[in-house]
Image: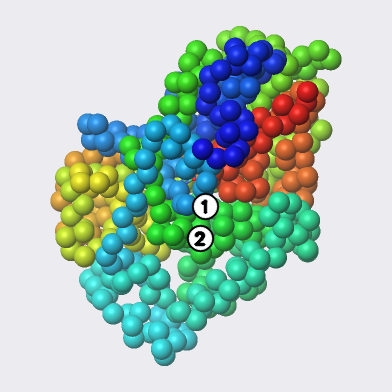
Amino acid sequence: MSEAHRRQGHGRQDHRREGRRGTAVVVGAGLAGLTAATGLAARGFDVTVLEARNRVGGRIHGIEAAPGTWVDGGAAYLGDRHTELLALASELGLKTTPTTMLGASRFALDRDPDPDPDPDSAPADRTGTDTVTGTATRDGRFPPLNAVALGDLFERLAQLTAAVRPEAPWLTPDAERLDTLTAAEWAEQHLSHPDARLFFPLFLGEMCAADPADVSVLHLAFYLRSGGGLRYLNAFAGGAQQDRIDGGAHRLCERLAERLGERVRLGEAVLAVHQDDRAVTVRSDRSAYRADVAVMALPPLLADAIAYEPALPVPRAGERTARGCAVKVHLVYPAPVWRDHGLSGWSVNARGPLLSTVDDSPEGGIGVLTGFVTGAEAHRFGALTPEQQRAEALAQAGRLFPMLPEPVGFHVTDWLDDPFSRGCYAALLGPGDWTRLGPTLTAPHRRVHWAGTETSTAFFGLMEGAIRSGHRVVAEVLDRG
Ligand code: FAD
Protein backbone atom coordinates (compact mmCIF):
# COMPACT_ATOMS: atom_id res chain seq x y z
CA MET A 1 0.00 0.00 0.00
CA SER A 2 1.39 3.41 -0.96
CA GLU A 3 1.99 6.24 1.50
CA ALA A 4 -0.84 8.28 -0.06
CA HIS A 5 -3.25 5.38 0.48
CA ARG A 6 -2.12 4.94 4.06
CA ARG A 7 -2.60 8.65 4.85
CA GLN A 8 -6.11 8.61 3.46
CA GLY A 9 -7.08 5.27 4.93
CA HIS A 10 -7.83 4.29 1.34
CA GLY A 11 -10.41 1.55 0.98
CA ARG A 12 -11.18 1.18 4.68
CA GLN A 13 -14.90 1.28 5.39
CA ASP A 14 -14.35 2.44 8.97
CA HIS A 15 -15.96 5.87 8.94
CA ARG A 16 -18.23 4.99 11.86
CA ARG A 17 -15.14 4.47 14.00
CA GLU A 18 -13.70 7.82 12.88
CA GLY A 19 -17.00 9.63 13.28
CA ARG A 20 -19.01 11.60 10.73
CA ARG A 21 -16.89 14.46 9.37
CA GLY A 22 -19.38 16.06 6.98
CA THR A 23 -21.30 15.37 3.80
CA ALA A 24 -19.96 15.20 0.26
CA VAL A 25 -21.53 14.66 -3.14
CA VAL A 26 -19.16 13.28 -5.77
CA VAL A 27 -20.26 13.79 -9.36
CA GLY A 28 -18.96 11.08 -11.72
CA ALA A 29 -18.13 7.46 -10.93
CA GLY A 30 -15.02 7.22 -13.07
CA LEU A 31 -11.72 6.26 -11.48
CA ALA A 32 -11.20 9.80 -10.12
CA GLY A 33 -14.66 10.09 -8.56
CA LEU A 34 -14.55 6.58 -7.08
CA THR A 35 -11.08 7.22 -5.62
CA ALA A 36 -12.24 10.50 -4.10
CA ALA A 37 -15.45 8.96 -2.73
CA THR A 38 -13.61 6.00 -1.23
CA GLY A 39 -11.05 8.30 0.41
CA LEU A 40 -13.70 10.63 1.82
CA ALA A 41 -15.87 7.77 3.08
CA ALA A 42 -12.84 6.25 4.78
CA ARG A 43 -12.24 9.56 6.56
CA GLY A 44 -15.73 9.75 7.98
CA PHE A 45 -17.62 11.66 5.29
CA ASP A 46 -21.16 10.77 4.45
CA VAL A 47 -20.70 10.39 0.68
CA THR A 48 -23.11 10.15 -2.24
CA VAL A 49 -21.78 9.46 -5.74
CA LEU A 50 -23.95 10.53 -8.66
CA GLU A 51 -23.22 8.85 -11.98
CA ALA A 52 -25.06 9.66 -15.23
CA ARG A 53 -24.48 6.27 -16.85
CA ASN A 54 -25.95 2.97 -15.78
CA ARG A 55 -22.46 1.68 -15.05
CA VAL A 56 -19.39 2.88 -13.20
CA GLY A 57 -15.94 3.39 -14.77
CA GLY A 58 -16.47 6.22 -17.24
CA ARG A 59 -13.63 6.02 -19.75
CA ILE A 60 -12.74 2.59 -18.36
CA HIS A 61 -15.13 0.05 -19.84
CA GLY A 62 -15.02 -3.74 -20.09
CA ILE A 63 -16.27 -5.57 -23.17
CA GLU A 64 -17.01 -9.28 -23.08
CA ALA A 65 -15.07 -10.40 -26.17
CA ALA A 66 -15.96 -14.07 -25.63
CA PRO A 67 -17.96 -15.69 -22.81
CA GLY A 68 -16.07 -14.89 -19.60
CA THR A 69 -13.22 -13.08 -21.40
CA TRP A 70 -13.10 -9.31 -21.06
CA VAL A 71 -11.13 -6.75 -23.04
CA ASP A 72 -10.72 -3.03 -22.50
CA GLY A 73 -12.99 -0.85 -24.62
CA GLY A 74 -11.45 2.18 -22.89
CA ALA A 75 -8.25 2.52 -20.89
CA ALA A 76 -6.03 -0.54 -20.92
CA TYR A 77 -2.29 0.00 -20.44
CA LEU A 78 -0.11 0.88 -17.51
CA GLY A 79 3.56 0.95 -16.60
CA ASP A 80 5.69 0.66 -13.49
CA ARG A 81 5.74 4.43 -12.93
CA HIS A 82 1.96 4.33 -12.42
CA THR A 83 2.54 3.74 -8.76
CA GLU A 84 -0.88 4.74 -7.39
CA LEU A 85 -2.63 2.59 -9.97
CA LEU A 86 -0.45 -0.41 -9.15
CA ALA A 87 -1.02 0.13 -5.43
CA LEU A 88 -4.78 0.32 -5.97
CA ALA A 89 -4.83 -2.80 -8.14
CA SER A 90 -2.88 -4.73 -5.55
CA GLU A 91 -5.09 -3.52 -2.72
CA LEU A 92 -8.19 -4.57 -4.66
CA GLY A 93 -6.68 -8.01 -5.26
CA LEU A 94 -6.18 -7.51 -9.00
CA LYS A 95 -3.17 -8.71 -10.97
CA THR A 96 -1.49 -7.25 -14.03
CA THR A 97 -0.66 -9.12 -17.21
CA PRO A 98 2.10 -8.13 -19.68
CA THR A 99 1.13 -6.69 -23.05
CA THR A 100 2.61 -9.13 -25.56
CA MET A 101 4.95 -7.58 -28.10
CA LEU A 102 6.95 -10.50 -29.49
CA GLY A 103 7.78 -10.72 -33.17
CA ALA A 104 7.90 -8.38 -36.12
CA SER A 105 5.77 -5.30 -36.77
CA ARG A 106 3.81 -4.46 -39.91
CA PHE A 107 3.86 -1.01 -41.50
CA ALA A 108 1.55 0.21 -44.26
CA LEU A 109 3.04 3.67 -44.76
CA ASP A 110 2.45 4.02 -48.48
CA ARG A 111 3.61 7.43 -49.50
CA ASP A 112 5.48 9.27 -52.24
CA PRO A 113 9.03 8.03 -52.76
CA ASP A 114 11.57 9.48 -50.33
CA PRO A 115 13.23 12.45 -52.15
CA ASP A 116 16.19 12.40 -49.77
CA PRO A 117 16.82 8.80 -48.76
CA ASP A 118 19.28 8.27 -45.96
CA PRO A 119 21.96 6.00 -47.51
CA ASP A 120 22.52 4.13 -44.26
CA SER A 121 18.94 3.50 -43.26
CA ALA A 122 17.23 3.12 -46.63
CA PRO A 123 18.24 -0.43 -47.63
CA ALA A 124 17.49 -1.94 -44.22
CA ASP A 125 14.26 0.04 -43.92
CA ARG A 126 12.86 -1.28 -47.15
CA THR A 127 13.46 -5.00 -46.52
CA GLY A 128 10.48 -7.27 -46.17
CA THR A 129 8.01 -5.11 -48.11
CA ASP A 130 5.10 -6.96 -49.68
CA THR A 131 4.81 -5.41 -53.13
CA VAL A 132 1.14 -6.42 -53.51
CA THR A 133 -0.16 -4.80 -50.33
CA GLY A 134 2.70 -2.29 -49.87
CA THR A 135 3.04 -3.50 -46.30
CA ALA A 136 6.51 -3.76 -44.75
CA THR A 137 7.52 -6.27 -42.10
CA ARG A 138 10.22 -5.18 -39.74
CA ASP A 139 11.70 -6.21 -36.42
CA GLY A 140 11.03 -3.75 -33.62
CA ARG A 141 8.66 -0.80 -33.71
CA PHE A 142 10.72 1.81 -35.55
CA PRO A 143 8.88 2.55 -38.80
CA PRO A 144 10.55 2.03 -42.17
CA LEU A 145 10.82 5.75 -42.83
CA ASN A 146 13.79 8.06 -43.11
CA ALA A 147 15.64 7.50 -39.85
CA VAL A 148 17.36 10.89 -39.90
CA ALA A 149 14.07 12.74 -40.43
CA LEU A 150 12.37 10.82 -37.62
CA GLY A 151 15.38 11.27 -35.35
CA ASP A 152 15.15 15.02 -35.96
CA LEU A 153 11.41 14.99 -35.16
CA PHE A 154 11.95 13.12 -31.88
CA GLU A 155 14.86 15.39 -30.94
CA ARG A 156 12.71 18.51 -31.49
CA LEU A 157 9.89 17.01 -29.43
CA ALA A 158 12.33 16.02 -26.69
CA GLN A 159 13.59 19.62 -26.51
CA LEU A 160 10.06 20.99 -26.19
CA THR A 161 9.26 18.36 -23.56
CA ALA A 162 12.39 19.12 -21.50
CA ALA A 163 11.63 22.86 -21.45
CA VAL A 164 8.04 22.59 -20.17
CA ARG A 165 7.18 23.20 -16.50
CA PRO A 166 5.09 20.06 -15.83
CA GLU A 167 3.53 21.23 -12.56
CA ALA A 168 2.57 24.62 -14.07
CA PRO A 169 2.80 24.58 -17.89
CA TRP A 170 1.57 28.18 -18.08
CA LEU A 171 4.85 29.23 -16.40
CA THR A 172 7.01 27.52 -19.05
CA PRO A 173 9.49 29.90 -20.67
CA ASP A 174 7.86 31.20 -23.86
CA ALA A 175 4.50 29.75 -22.74
CA GLU A 176 2.41 32.45 -24.47
CA ARG A 177 3.92 31.71 -27.87
CA LEU A 178 3.84 27.93 -27.45
CA ASP A 179 0.21 28.17 -26.38
CA THR A 180 -0.85 30.14 -29.47
CA LEU A 181 0.61 27.67 -31.92
CA THR A 182 -1.17 24.42 -32.84
CA ALA A 183 0.87 21.24 -33.28
CA ALA A 184 -0.16 21.30 -36.97
CA GLU A 185 1.28 24.81 -37.39
CA TRP A 186 4.44 23.77 -35.55
CA ALA A 187 4.85 20.78 -37.90
CA GLU A 188 4.37 23.04 -40.90
CA GLN A 189 7.14 25.32 -39.64
CA HIS A 190 9.62 22.73 -38.42
CA LEU A 191 9.20 19.47 -40.33
CA SER A 192 10.51 19.66 -43.85
CA HIS A 193 10.98 15.96 -44.64
CA PRO A 194 7.85 14.20 -45.96
CA ASP A 195 8.49 11.18 -43.72
CA ALA A 196 8.45 13.34 -40.60
CA ARG A 197 5.27 15.06 -41.81
CA LEU A 198 3.67 11.68 -42.50
CA PHE A 199 4.63 10.20 -39.16
CA PHE A 200 3.86 13.17 -36.88
CA PRO A 201 0.02 12.91 -37.01
CA LEU A 202 0.21 9.12 -36.62
CA PHE A 203 2.40 9.58 -33.57
CA LEU A 204 -0.01 12.13 -32.06
CA GLY A 205 -2.96 9.87 -32.75
CA GLU A 206 -1.23 7.03 -30.98
CA MET A 207 0.00 9.14 -28.04
CA CYS A 208 -3.06 11.24 -27.28
CA ALA A 209 -5.76 10.53 -29.89
CA ALA A 210 -5.23 14.02 -31.22
CA ASP A 211 -5.51 15.68 -34.57
CA PRO A 212 -2.48 18.03 -34.69
CA ALA A 213 -4.83 20.93 -35.52
CA ASP A 214 -6.57 20.47 -32.15
CA VAL A 215 -3.72 20.77 -29.64
CA SER A 216 -1.40 23.61 -28.76
CA VAL A 217 2.34 22.95 -28.79
CA LEU A 218 2.36 23.78 -25.09
CA HIS A 219 -0.20 21.05 -24.45
CA LEU A 220 1.70 18.52 -26.55
CA ALA A 221 4.95 19.24 -24.70
CA PHE A 222 3.16 19.14 -21.35
CA TYR A 223 1.35 15.89 -22.17
CA LEU A 224 4.57 14.13 -23.13
CA ARG A 225 6.37 15.39 -20.01
CA SER A 226 3.47 14.67 -17.68
CA GLY A 227 3.30 11.06 -18.90
CA GLY A 228 7.01 10.42 -18.25
CA GLY A 229 8.55 11.63 -21.53
CA LEU A 230 8.25 10.57 -25.13
CA ARG A 231 10.23 7.36 -24.79
CA TYR A 232 8.39 6.13 -21.68
CA LEU A 233 4.94 7.02 -23.02
CA ASN A 234 5.60 5.29 -26.32
CA ALA A 235 7.18 2.10 -24.96
CA PHE A 236 5.64 -1.27 -24.19
CA ALA A 237 8.27 -3.20 -22.14
CA GLY A 238 9.64 -0.70 -19.61
CA GLY A 239 7.09 1.93 -20.63
CA ALA A 240 3.52 3.08 -20.21
CA GLN A 241 2.06 0.18 -22.22
CA GLN A 242 3.92 -2.56 -20.39
CA ASP A 243 0.95 -4.20 -18.64
CA ARG A 244 -2.83 -4.40 -18.47
CA ILE A 245 -5.13 -5.27 -15.59
CA ASP A 246 -5.84 -8.99 -15.75
CA GLY A 247 -9.51 -9.43 -16.62
CA GLY A 248 -9.93 -5.78 -17.62
CA ALA A 249 -9.32 -2.36 -16.07
CA HIS A 250 -13.06 -2.01 -15.38
CA ARG A 251 -12.59 -4.39 -12.46
CA LEU A 252 -10.78 -1.60 -10.59
CA CYS A 253 -13.89 0.56 -10.75
CA GLU A 254 -16.32 -2.27 -10.07
CA ARG A 255 -14.44 -3.25 -6.92
CA LEU A 256 -14.28 0.34 -5.66
CA ALA A 257 -17.99 0.71 -6.35
CA GLU A 258 -18.73 -2.55 -4.50
CA ARG A 259 -17.04 -1.08 -1.43
CA LEU A 260 -19.06 2.11 -1.69
CA GLY A 261 -22.27 0.08 -2.07
CA GLU A 262 -25.48 2.09 -2.02
CA ARG A 263 -23.60 5.35 -1.84
CA VAL A 264 -23.22 5.07 -5.65
CA ARG A 265 -26.35 6.12 -7.53
CA LEU A 266 -26.36 5.17 -11.21
CA GLY A 267 -28.42 6.79 -13.96
CA GLU A 268 -28.46 10.24 -12.33
CA ALA A 269 -27.11 12.96 -14.58
CA VAL A 270 -26.20 16.10 -12.69
CA LEU A 271 -27.59 19.28 -14.21
CA ALA A 272 -26.91 22.05 -11.71
CA VAL A 273 -24.83 22.97 -8.67
CA HIS A 274 -26.08 25.77 -6.42
CA GLN A 275 -24.25 27.16 -3.41
CA ASP A 276 -25.38 29.35 -0.55
CA ASP A 277 -23.58 30.36 2.62
CA ARG A 278 -24.34 27.08 4.38
CA ALA A 279 -24.19 24.31 1.79
CA VAL A 280 -24.00 23.17 -1.80
CA THR A 281 -27.03 21.67 -3.57
CA VAL A 282 -26.38 19.26 -6.43
CA ARG A 283 -29.40 18.74 -8.69
CA SER A 284 -29.64 15.69 -10.90
CA ASP A 285 -32.39 14.82 -13.37
CA ARG A 286 -34.02 12.84 -10.53
CA SER A 287 -33.34 14.56 -7.25
CA ALA A 288 -31.41 17.17 -5.26
CA TYR A 289 -28.66 16.54 -2.70
CA ARG A 290 -27.51 19.06 -0.11
CA ALA A 291 -23.97 18.65 1.23
CA ASP A 292 -21.01 20.44 2.75
CA VAL A 293 -18.89 19.95 -0.35
CA ALA A 294 -19.22 18.75 -3.93
CA VAL A 295 -16.46 17.04 -5.89
CA MET A 296 -16.85 17.33 -9.66
CA ALA A 297 -14.94 14.41 -11.18
CA LEU A 298 -15.71 14.98 -14.86
CA PRO A 299 -13.85 15.85 -18.05
CA PRO A 300 -13.76 19.66 -18.50
CA LEU A 301 -16.19 19.85 -21.43
CA LEU A 302 -18.79 17.97 -19.36
CA ALA A 303 -18.10 19.91 -16.17
CA ASP A 304 -18.83 23.09 -18.14
CA ALA A 305 -22.19 21.74 -19.31
CA ILE A 306 -23.48 21.94 -15.72
CA ALA A 307 -25.17 25.17 -14.49
CA TYR A 308 -23.35 26.74 -11.52
CA GLU A 309 -24.86 29.30 -9.18
CA PRO A 310 -22.88 31.40 -8.42
CA ALA A 311 -21.29 31.10 -11.84
CA LEU A 312 -17.72 29.83 -12.21
CA PRO A 313 -15.21 32.69 -12.32
CA VAL A 314 -13.26 30.81 -15.03
CA PRO A 315 -14.79 28.05 -17.18
CA ARG A 316 -13.37 24.53 -17.08
CA ALA A 317 -12.81 24.46 -20.86
CA GLY A 318 -11.91 27.07 -23.46
CA GLU A 319 -13.28 27.84 -26.89
CA ARG A 320 -10.57 25.69 -28.48
CA THR A 321 -10.68 22.77 -25.99
CA ALA A 322 -11.34 19.73 -28.17
CA ARG A 323 -12.49 16.18 -27.69
CA GLY A 324 -9.78 13.53 -27.99
CA CYS A 325 -10.77 11.37 -30.94
CA ALA A 326 -10.54 7.63 -30.59
CA VAL A 327 -12.63 4.68 -31.63
CA LYS A 328 -11.41 1.29 -30.44
CA VAL A 329 -12.05 -1.76 -32.60
CA HIS A 330 -11.66 -5.29 -31.26
CA LEU A 331 -11.26 -8.16 -33.69
CA VAL A 332 -11.58 -11.49 -31.91
CA TYR A 333 -10.13 -14.78 -33.22
CA PRO A 334 -9.99 -18.31 -31.83
CA ALA A 335 -6.23 -17.78 -31.19
CA PRO A 336 -3.54 -15.12 -31.79
CA VAL A 337 -2.56 -16.75 -35.08
CA TRP A 338 -0.24 -13.90 -36.13
CA ARG A 339 2.20 -15.05 -33.45
CA ASP A 340 2.68 -18.35 -35.31
CA HIS A 341 3.93 -16.30 -38.26
CA GLY A 342 6.48 -14.34 -36.22
CA LEU A 343 4.30 -11.23 -36.05
CA SER A 344 3.59 -9.24 -32.91
CA GLY A 345 0.20 -7.91 -34.02
CA TRP A 346 1.61 -4.38 -33.87
CA SER A 347 1.11 -2.31 -37.00
CA VAL A 348 1.22 1.36 -37.96
CA ASN A 349 -0.72 2.53 -40.98
CA ALA A 350 -0.89 5.77 -42.91
CA ARG A 351 -4.47 5.08 -43.96
CA GLY A 352 -7.37 4.09 -41.82
CA PRO A 353 -9.49 3.03 -40.39
CA LEU A 354 -7.01 1.10 -38.21
CA LEU A 355 -4.10 3.53 -37.84
CA SER A 356 -2.43 1.12 -35.45
CA THR A 357 -3.10 -2.38 -34.13
CA VAL A 358 -1.87 -4.18 -31.05
CA ASP A 359 -2.15 -7.70 -29.65
CA ASP A 360 -4.44 -7.54 -26.61
CA SER A 361 -5.01 -11.28 -26.34
CA PRO A 362 -5.58 -12.64 -22.86
CA GLU A 363 -3.01 -15.20 -21.78
CA GLY A 364 -3.52 -18.67 -23.20
CA GLY A 365 -6.89 -18.01 -24.79
CA ILE A 366 -8.54 -16.27 -27.71
CA GLY A 367 -6.72 -13.86 -30.02
CA VAL A 368 -7.66 -10.20 -29.69
CA LEU A 369 -6.35 -7.65 -32.13
CA THR A 370 -7.17 -4.10 -31.03
CA GLY A 371 -7.35 -1.44 -33.70
CA PHE A 372 -7.05 2.27 -32.90
CA VAL A 373 -8.93 4.73 -35.09
CA THR A 374 -7.76 8.17 -34.04
CA GLY A 375 -7.66 11.85 -34.98
CA ALA A 376 -9.63 13.00 -38.03
CA GLU A 377 -10.07 9.36 -39.14
CA ALA A 378 -12.14 8.66 -36.01
CA HIS A 379 -14.75 11.22 -37.17
CA ARG A 380 -15.00 9.62 -40.62
CA PHE A 381 -15.17 6.06 -39.25
CA GLY A 382 -17.68 7.02 -36.56
CA ALA A 383 -20.09 8.26 -39.25
CA LEU A 384 -20.15 4.89 -41.11
CA THR A 385 -22.86 2.27 -40.63
CA PRO A 386 -21.91 -0.75 -38.48
CA GLU A 387 -21.76 -2.88 -41.65
CA GLN A 388 -19.39 -0.44 -43.33
CA GLN A 389 -17.23 -0.24 -40.22
CA ARG A 390 -16.94 -4.02 -40.06
CA ALA A 391 -16.20 -4.35 -43.78
CA GLU A 392 -13.48 -1.68 -43.71
CA ALA A 393 -11.81 -2.93 -40.54
CA LEU A 394 -11.80 -6.57 -41.63
CA ALA A 395 -10.48 -5.75 -45.09
CA GLN A 396 -7.61 -3.77 -43.61
CA ALA A 397 -6.80 -6.37 -40.96
CA GLY A 398 -6.74 -8.99 -43.74
CA ARG A 399 -4.20 -6.95 -45.72
CA LEU A 400 -2.01 -6.47 -42.67
CA PHE A 401 -2.26 -10.04 -41.42
CA PRO A 402 -3.22 -12.26 -44.38
CA MET A 403 -3.22 -15.36 -42.15
CA LEU A 404 -6.28 -14.17 -40.18
CA PRO A 405 -9.33 -16.45 -40.26
CA GLU A 406 -12.89 -15.09 -40.02
CA PRO A 407 -13.22 -13.29 -36.69
CA VAL A 408 -15.45 -14.85 -34.05
CA GLY A 409 -16.20 -11.44 -32.58
CA PHE A 410 -16.13 -7.80 -33.66
CA HIS A 411 -16.68 -4.81 -31.36
CA VAL A 412 -16.55 -1.08 -31.98
CA THR A 413 -16.37 1.34 -29.04
CA ASP A 414 -16.89 4.92 -30.19
CA TRP A 415 -15.99 7.50 -27.54
CA LEU A 416 -16.44 10.57 -29.69
CA ASP A 417 -20.21 10.55 -29.66
CA ASP A 418 -20.57 9.25 -26.14
CA PRO A 419 -22.49 12.03 -24.36
CA PHE A 420 -20.88 11.20 -20.99
CA SER A 421 -17.28 11.19 -22.23
CA ARG A 422 -17.25 13.46 -25.26
CA GLY A 423 -14.07 11.99 -26.59
CA CYS A 424 -10.94 10.38 -25.24
CA TYR A 425 -8.33 9.48 -24.19
CA ALA A 426 -8.59 12.90 -22.55
CA ALA A 427 -9.58 16.46 -23.37
CA LEU A 428 -7.23 18.15 -25.84
CA LEU A 429 -6.14 21.57 -24.68
CA GLY A 430 -6.06 23.88 -27.67
CA PRO A 431 -4.51 27.30 -28.25
CA GLY A 432 -4.91 29.59 -25.25
CA ASP A 433 -6.20 26.89 -22.89
CA TRP A 434 -3.20 26.34 -20.65
CA THR A 435 -2.35 30.00 -20.20
CA ARG A 436 -6.00 30.92 -19.50
CA LEU A 437 -7.36 27.90 -17.65
CA GLY A 438 -4.23 26.34 -16.17
CA PRO A 439 -3.84 28.59 -13.12
CA THR A 440 -7.38 27.73 -11.88
CA LEU A 441 -7.29 24.05 -12.84
CA THR A 442 -7.63 22.82 -9.26
CA ALA A 443 -8.78 25.99 -7.46
CA PRO A 444 -12.00 25.20 -5.53
CA HIS A 445 -15.07 27.30 -6.35
CA ARG A 446 -16.22 27.86 -2.76
CA ARG A 447 -17.59 24.42 -1.75
CA VAL A 448 -16.99 22.87 -5.17
CA HIS A 449 -13.74 20.94 -5.71
CA TRP A 450 -12.37 19.54 -8.97
CA ALA A 451 -11.06 16.05 -9.75
CA GLY A 452 -10.61 14.01 -12.91
CA THR A 453 -7.52 13.07 -14.89
CA GLU A 454 -7.55 16.45 -16.63
CA THR A 455 -6.89 18.16 -13.29
CA SER A 456 -3.71 16.16 -12.64
CA THR A 457 -0.45 17.63 -13.86
CA ALA A 458 1.19 14.22 -13.29
CA PHE A 459 0.09 11.56 -15.79
CA PHE A 460 -2.57 13.88 -17.24
CA GLY A 461 -5.08 11.93 -19.31
CA LEU A 462 -4.16 8.55 -17.85
CA MET A 463 -5.71 6.32 -15.18
CA GLU A 464 -2.79 7.22 -12.91
CA GLY A 465 -3.68 10.91 -13.27
CA ALA A 466 -7.32 10.17 -12.40
CA ILE A 467 -6.33 8.37 -9.18
CA ARG A 468 -3.87 11.09 -8.19
CA SER A 469 -6.56 13.73 -8.73
CA GLY A 470 -8.84 11.74 -6.42
CA HIS A 471 -6.19 11.66 -3.70
CA ARG A 472 -5.49 15.39 -4.10
CA VAL A 473 -9.14 16.31 -3.75
CA VAL A 474 -9.53 14.23 -0.58
CA ALA A 475 -6.59 16.08 0.98
CA GLU A 476 -8.09 19.40 -0.14
CA VAL A 477 -11.49 18.64 1.39
CA LEU A 478 -9.88 17.51 4.66
CA ASP A 479 -7.88 20.74 4.73
CA ARG A 480 -11.09 22.79 4.73
CA GLY A 481 -11.33 21.80 8.39
P1 FAD B 1 -14.10 9.59 -16.49
O1 FAD B 1 -13.71 8.18 -16.59
O2 FAD B 1 -14.51 10.27 -17.76
O3 FAD B 1 -15.26 9.71 -15.41
C1 FAD B 1 -16.22 10.73 -15.42
C2 FAD B 1 -17.56 10.13 -15.03
O4 FAD B 1 -18.53 11.18 -14.95
C3 FAD B 1 -18.10 9.16 -16.07
O5 FAD B 1 -18.45 7.95 -15.43
C4 FAD B 1 -19.32 9.86 -16.67
O6 FAD B 1 -20.34 8.98 -17.04
C5 FAD B 1 -19.76 10.72 -15.50
N1 FAD B 1 -20.54 11.89 -15.89
C6 FAD B 1 -20.37 12.69 -16.97
N2 FAD B 1 -21.27 13.70 -16.95
C7 FAD B 1 -22.02 13.54 -15.83
C8 FAD B 1 -23.09 14.27 -15.24
N3 FAD B 1 -23.58 15.38 -15.77
N4 FAD B 1 -23.62 13.80 -14.08
C9 FAD B 1 -23.14 12.67 -13.49
N5 FAD B 1 -22.12 11.95 -14.01
C10 FAD B 1 -21.55 12.38 -15.16
N6 FAD B 1 -5.51 5.67 -19.68
C11 FAD B 1 -4.44 4.91 -19.33
O7 FAD B 1 -3.88 5.08 -18.23
N7 FAD B 1 -3.97 3.94 -20.17
C12 FAD B 1 -4.55 3.68 -21.37
O8 FAD B 1 -4.15 2.75 -22.08
C13 FAD B 1 -5.64 4.48 -21.77
N8 FAD B 1 -6.24 4.27 -22.97
C14 FAD B 1 -7.45 4.82 -23.20
C15 FAD B 1 -8.16 4.40 -24.33
C16 FAD B 1 -9.44 4.85 -24.52
C17 FAD B 1 -10.20 4.36 -25.74
C18 FAD B 1 -10.04 5.72 -23.57
C19 FAD B 1 -11.49 6.09 -23.70
C20 FAD B 1 -9.31 6.19 -22.51
C21 FAD B 1 -8.01 5.75 -22.30
N9 FAD B 1 -7.24 6.16 -21.20
C22 FAD B 1 -6.12 5.46 -20.87
C23 FAD B 1 -7.64 7.31 -20.36
C24 FAD B 1 -8.36 6.89 -19.07
O9 FAD B 1 -9.47 6.11 -19.38
C25 FAD B 1 -8.81 8.14 -18.33
O10 FAD B 1 -7.69 8.95 -18.03
C26 FAD B 1 -9.49 7.86 -16.98
O11 FAD B 1 -10.32 6.75 -17.03
C27 FAD B 1 -10.29 9.11 -16.60
O12 FAD B 1 -10.98 8.92 -15.39
P2 FAD B 1 -11.84 10.11 -14.77
O13 FAD B 1 -12.48 9.57 -13.57
O14 FAD B 1 -10.99 11.31 -14.67
O15 FAD B 1 -12.92 10.48 -15.89
Identity of the residue drawn at 50% across and 13% down: 262
Q: Quadrant of the C terminus?
A: top right
Which residue is at the far top? 287
- Amino acid type of the residue that numbered disc 2 sits on in the rendered structure: Tyr
Tell me the tag on residue 232. Answer: 2
Q: Look at the image and tell me whether residue 153 can be seen.
A: yes
x then y, percent, for residue 273: 71, 19
x then y, percent, for residue 174: 78, 64
> Secondary structure beneath disc 1?
loop
Q: Is residue 23 above or below residue 244?
A: above
Mark 1 is surrounded, within 10 Å at the Cα level, by few (under 14), some (14 to 19) or many (20 or more) other residues, namely some
- Which of 95 and 439 lies nearest the eye of the viewer? 95
Mark 2 is surrounded, within 10 Å at the Cα level, by few (under 14), some (14 to 19) or many (20 or more) other residues, namely some
- Which of 335 and 1 lies nearest the eye of the viewer? 1
x then y, percent, for residue 143: 40, 71
Which residue is at the far front? 17
Q: Is residue 357 above or below residue 296?
A: below
x then y, percent, for residue 148: 50, 81
Q: Residue beneath label 1, please?
A: 81
- Which of 457 and 216 lies nearest the eye of the viewer? 457
Identity of the residue drawn at 25% across and 46% down: 363
> What colouring does the structure picture have?
rainbow
